């Protein structure tokens, strides 16, 4: 099946079909929508990645970061820049928002910048939406595994089991997990925690929160205000920002860390390593994620027809001062 077949069925010229698929001036929105609907109905799939690479600048890479307020994304960007600087490549940066409201618009901005590949760190949109964008321009998903899309990611499930088993080894029994919203690509940490708890014969205790330090503090505060026989002896937070929120709430409630409660995060972001913080955490090796993603981008630029590349990184436990024996 060819573009000529689509043009005949839609009753337009082949040139208009080409314009519609390339999303360039020349076809009205109504005509473009009709052409795409006809193509979908006929089962026609244009090689959009190949045409994208032909029409964009292969020397320029785009970088999407979910949230600059979370240091882990700065670590990933450092890893990306290390490789792009070596290759004398320009980067175009776009920043999202932790409630995923800017994912689509940020990606669209990068597409309009006529870049060769988009490295996207922390996308929260559904898999199907990312896969659709990937048909228009190659995407390298950083810190999240997406089927059919080039991905470099941390093995979150493994890290969460590691974290929970470490807390159990300290004699902790009442371990609460402060959970991120459960969306495509971000369920492994909760699942790993639940498995480790159940394998130890303990009941998981889960509090749903979001990616904000302030919201994490508000969500954990009522639990910390329970009497010492009921409140958790440890809180495992889904990321470092949330763990810092737990520390804020504990300080405000007069609860000592780690004497009264242990707190463990996930990311090993810059602030977790800061003097005076000393947050125990799971290291996802953010800079390494970024550098691997940038190398993937180089390969995708020159080998657009290879299958999606997938690379998982095993996290590691970092023990600092916010965890201790019960």
Image: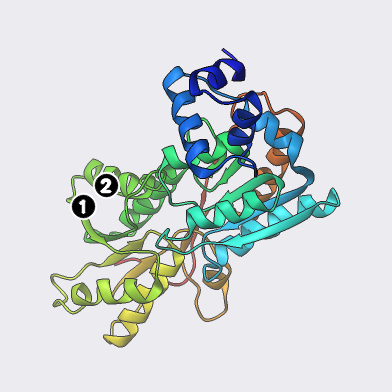
Q: Residue at horizontal 34%, vertical 58%?
A: 180
Q: Which residue is mark 2?
A: 194
Q: Secondary structure at mark 1?
A: loop
Spatial CA distance of label 1 from label 2 is 6 Å
In which quadrant will I find the N terminus? top right
Return the residue nearer the eye: 56 or 127: 56
Within 10 Å of disc 2 (Cα), the crowding (few <14, some 14-19, many 20+) is: many
**x, y percent for residue 175:** 26, 60
Which residue in the rendered view is the most extreme toward the top?
Answer: 1
Return the residue nearer the eye: 160 or 120: 120
Above-or-below relation of 316 to 134 = below
Q: Which mark is residue 204?
A: 1
Above-or-below relation of 274 to 209 = below
Within 10 Å of disc 1 (Cα), the crowding (few <14, some 14-19, many 20+) is: some
Query: Would residue 96 be seen by someone viewing this image from the given angle?
Result: yes
Q: Residue at horizontal 44%, vertical 48%?
A: 159
**x, y percent for residue 22:** 63, 37
Q: Secondary structure at mark 2?
A: helix
**x, y percent for residue 251:** 34, 84
In which quadrant of the rendered view does residue 106 lie?
bottom right
* Apparent side of residue 251 relative to residue 5 in the rendered image (left or right): left
Q: Residue at horizontal 25%, vertical 48%?
A: 197
Q: Are marks 1 and 2 in contact (CB under 8 Å)?
A: yes
């Amino acid at each position: 099946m060819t573009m000529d077949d689509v043009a005949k069925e839609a009753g337009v010229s082949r040139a208009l079909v080409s314009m519609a698929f390339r999303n360039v001036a020349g076809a009205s929105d109504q005509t473009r929508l009709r052409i795409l609907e006809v193509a979908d109905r006929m089962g026609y799939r244009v090689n959009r990645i190949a045409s994208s690479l032909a029409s964009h600048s292969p020397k320029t890479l785009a970088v999407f970061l979910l949230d600059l307020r979370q240091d882990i994304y700065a670590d990933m960007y450092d890893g990306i820049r290390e490789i792009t600087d070596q290759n004398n490549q320009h980067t175009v940066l776009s920043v999202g928002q932790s409630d995923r409201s800017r994912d689509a618009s940020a990606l669209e901005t990068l597409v309009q910048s006529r870049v060769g590949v988009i490295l996207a760190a922390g996308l929260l949109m559904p898999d199907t939406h990312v896969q659709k964008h990937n048909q228009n321009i190659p995407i390298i998903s950083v810190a999240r595994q997406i089927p059919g899309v080039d991905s470099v990611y941390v093995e979150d499930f493994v890290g969460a089991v590691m974290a929970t088993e470490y807390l159990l080894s300290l004699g902790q029994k009442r371990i609460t997990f402060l959970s991120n919203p459960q969306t495509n690509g971000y369920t492994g940490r909760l699942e790993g925690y639940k498995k480790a708890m159940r394998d130890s014969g303990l009941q998981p205790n889960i509090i749903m929160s979001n990616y904000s330090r302030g919201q994490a503090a508000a969500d954990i505060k009522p639990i910390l205000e329970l009497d010492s026989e009921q409140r958790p002896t440890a809180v495992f937070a889904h990321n470092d920002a949330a763990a810092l929120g737990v520390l804020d709430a504990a300080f405000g409630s007069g609860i000592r860390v780690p004497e009264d409660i242990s707190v463990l995060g996930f990311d090993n972001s810059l602030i977790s390593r800061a003097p005076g913080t000393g947050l125990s955490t799971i290291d996802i090796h953010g800079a390494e994620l970024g550098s691997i993603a940038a190398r993937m981008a180089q390969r995708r630029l020159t080998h657009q027809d290879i299958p999606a590349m997938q690379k998982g990184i095993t996290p590691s436990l970092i023990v600092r001062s916010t965890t201790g024996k019960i």
